[in-house]
Amino acid sequence: MSETKRFTLWLLLIVLLLGFIVFFVWLSMRPRPPTYTIVQFSLPTPDYGNSASPVDQGAQNGMVSFELEVENPNKDSGIYYDDTGLTFYYGQETLGQKTILSSYQKKNSRNQIIDHLNIDSRVWNKLIGAISNATAELKVAVLTKIRYRMWGHTSKHHGINLHGKIPIGSNGKISGKKKKIKLHYNSKKWRK
């Protein structure tokens, strides 16, 4: 009888040990979502000495340039991106939208996206007015779907909905101590 108890206890320990091993392997192989960071953001500031500038004319559209860094932190899986929607807001108004075409990102890599947006003159004039007074705060939203590619298998779609706030100084660039703005998942705090 004691041999049966010993065998059962030994078998139970092996099953428990295998369960822990499978659990920790699953935790280590679970893919992490990509990180999005606004590395640089700038817009032309008013040139009060030049009457031909778009700000002084007030009828032309403005243009902002940005640099977005997308990092795949996974060491064992690549990421397929569907078309990515990037939207910038000033208050409740949309500054502009950009669509980044679908792509594949290799494992453990970073992609730099440098682009610009054309801004409607009505919103542009409000933004320039706020910036010339002190600073303005813009909001950015990223919306896309991704699939992970690991060991020849492609996962189902996972939604990405990220947001961030960009403080803009009187020089038209990111102000404050943080010069890089990491985007985070949506929260109630962002809506305020």
Image (cartoon, rainbow, N blue to C red):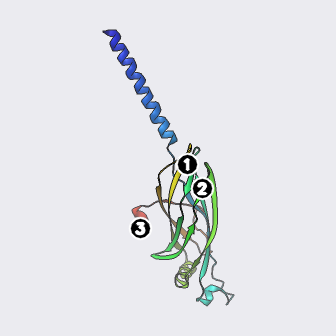
Q: Quadrant of the C terminus?
A: bottom left
- Which of the 4 image quadrants contains residue 52? bottom right
Element type at mark 1: strand
Residue positioned most to the left: 1
Q: Residue at x 59, y 44 (%)?
A: 75
Cβ–Cβ under 8 Å for marks 1 and 2: yes
Query: Looking at the image, is mark 1 or mark 2 earlier in the sequence?
Result: 2
Amino acid type of the residue tagged 2 in the rendering: Tyr
Cα distance, mark 2 to mark 3?
31 Å
Amino acid type of the residue tagged 1 in the rendering: Arg
Q: Which residue is mark 2?
A: 104
Element type at mark 3: helix
Q: Is residue 174 visible?
A: yes
Where residue 86 appears, x then y in whole percent?
A: 53, 67
116 left or right, relative to 29: right
Cα distance, mark 1 to mark 2?
9 Å
- Which of the 4 image quadrants contains residue 152? top right
Disc sitting over residue 149 in the figure: 1
Where residue 40 appears, x then y in whole percent?
A: 62, 66
Residue positioned most to the front: 152
Q: Which residue is mark 3?
A: 191
Query: Looking at the image, is mark 2 or mark 3 earlier in the sequence?
Result: 2
Amino acid type of the residue tagged 3 in the rendering: Arg
Q: Residue at x 42, y 30 (%)?
A: 19
Q: Residue at x 40, y 22 (%)?
A: 13
Cα distance, mark 3 to mark 1?
33 Å
Q: Is residue 178 visible?
A: no
